[in-house]
Image: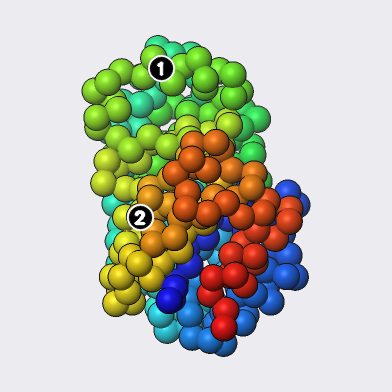
Amino acid sequence: MYKLIAVDMDGTLLNEKKEISNRSRKAISKLKEEGKKLVLATGRPLNGVMRYIEKLNLFDENDYVIAFNGALVQSTKTKQIIFNKPLSVKAYKELYEISQQLGVNIHALTDQSVLTPKNNPFTEIESNINQIPIIEGAVEEIKDTTIIVKVMFIDEPEKLDTIIPQIPNWIREKYTILRSAPYFLEFLDKSVNKGTGVSAVAKQLGLKREEVICVGDAGNDLDMIRYAGLGVAMGNAFDEIKSEADYITHTNEEDGVAHVIEKFMLD
């Protein structure tokens, strides 16, 4: 029996209007009534996810959130951190040099803002989605005490398609690299991904991986789909996600998450 479902947000739980449908809300409410758990597993910072946690009332004693693609896992009620693995300013500077060589835009996320050496439409998307401020300034001038959670190459999808094969092998070996959207390529600590985040929550709840469902649509969901007892790809998922999944549900516009909850978790 499945007791925990980890759900990606953008392209998965949220429709194209960035809303949670009534059917999904009802399914999640019923899930909670039956004593089972849902955890949001997202690439977003906490600021970008908390309003949805409030809408779903995920503030029980054993409710958690997985943010920054697994770099931060914490209790929604007590704020207790059970996993935290940020990057560093040194990493941001290192990746900035690579971005300069490849001619691609870059920004970095702290727990409260998005930092960029040059404002651009994709940093604006990040800011708007997560309701966090943009701080524009030279990478060289950032204080070493600044906490960098993740770094992102952000550009036209065609540009990222071109530069990804050019990323040096030593960078690939040093960082977890995830494509969370056609225009977002993310760099995290090597130990970080959504799979490790979900694993941390399952361990905290005393659950086996066989009791866990994970649902997602993009490259940053691959590790948790591989980890899960039941890995589910959305109908709108990347082909690589569908090929790895145990089950393919409906699209995010067709209540794919609600369908999974109703089919596999509700009595």
Give percent across and percent down for residue 154. Answer: 53, 29
Q: In the image, what residue type sits under mark 2? A: Tyr
Give percent across and percent down for residue 128. Answer: 66, 46
36 relative to 17, above or below: below
Left or right, 154 with respect to 52, comes to left
- Secondary structure beneath label 2: helix
Is residue 52 something one can see in this rendering? no
In the picture, the quarter occupied by the C terminus is bottom right
Q: Which residue is mark 1?
A: 165
Give percent across and percent down for residue 126. Answer: 59, 42
Which label number is shown at residue 131?
none
Instruction: Kindly identify the residue that appears in the image at 67 percent across and 54 percent down.
Output: 250
Between circles 1 and 2, the one closer to the viewer is 2
Would you identify the image quadrant in which residue 148 lies?
Answer: top left
Q: In the image, what residue type sits under mark 1? A: Pro
How busy is the neighbourhood of tag 1: few (under 14 within 10 Å), some, or many (20 plus)? few
Figure label count: 2
Say whether disc 1 or disc 2 marks the residue closer to the N-terminus: 1
- Out of 210 and 214, give the one closest to the viewer: 210
Would you identify the image quadrant in which residue 168 lies?
Answer: top left
- Out of 78 and 166, give the one closest to the viewer: 166
Q: Which residue is mark 2?
A: 227
Give percent across and percent down for residue 29. Answer: 62, 80
217 relative to 101, above or below: below
Instruction: Kindly identify the residue that appears in the image at 61 percent across and 23 percent down.
Output: 156
